[in-house]
Amino acid sequence: MRAKPEKIYRAFLDAGALARWLPPNGFTCKVDRLDAQVGGTFRMAFRNSGSKRRRHWKGLRPPPFVGAAAHG
């Protein structure tokens, strides 16, 4: 990736950024809830797929070890 780890990590924490980069090509995303902390939940809807995903954060690691794991 061309972005710095800090920018990538911040994108996991920002609903607007997440909605812009996460959806696959041809889809749009609306983030209804984003509680970006371990154990926090997020809810997003992808247009054109009709699905809603409910997930919770299993872990968030700030730079230099950027990563997130969702479960649910």
Image (cartoon, rainbow, N blue to C red):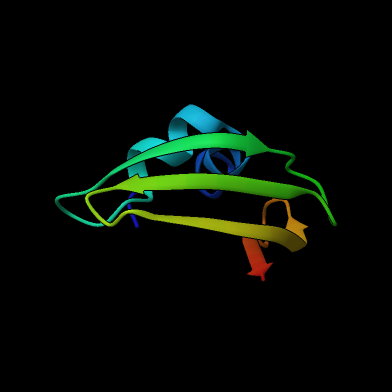
4 relative to 20, above or below: below
Residue 20 image position (x, y, % from top left): 34, 36
- Left or right, 8 with respect to 20, comes to right
**Quarter containing the C terminus:** bottom right
Q: Residue at x 74, y 39 (%)?
A: 35
Residue 3 visible in the picture: no
Q: Residue at x 81, y 47 (%)?
A: 37
- Left or right, 11 with respect to 20, comes to right
Between residue 33 and residue 65, name the one nearer to us.
Answer: 33
Which residue ends up furthest to the right in the rendered image? 39
**Quarter containing the N terminus:** bottom left
43 relative to 65, above or below: above
Q: How many marks?
A: 0
Residue 25 image position (x, y, % from top left): 17, 54
Residue 52 visible in the picture: yes
Between residue 54 and residue 39, name the one nearer to us.
Answer: 54
Residue 41 image position (x, y, % from top left): 73, 50
27 relative to 20, above or below: below
Which residue ends up furthest to the front in the rendered image? 50
- Left or right, 40 with respect to 52, comes to right
Between residue 26 and residue 45, name the one nearer to us.
Answer: 45
Which residue ends up furthest to the left in the rendered image? 26
Which residue ends up furthest to the top in the rendered image? 16
Q: Residue at x 27, y 57 (%)?
A: 49
- Left or right, 18 with respect to 35, comes to left
Between residue 10 and residue 31, name the one nearer to us.
Answer: 31
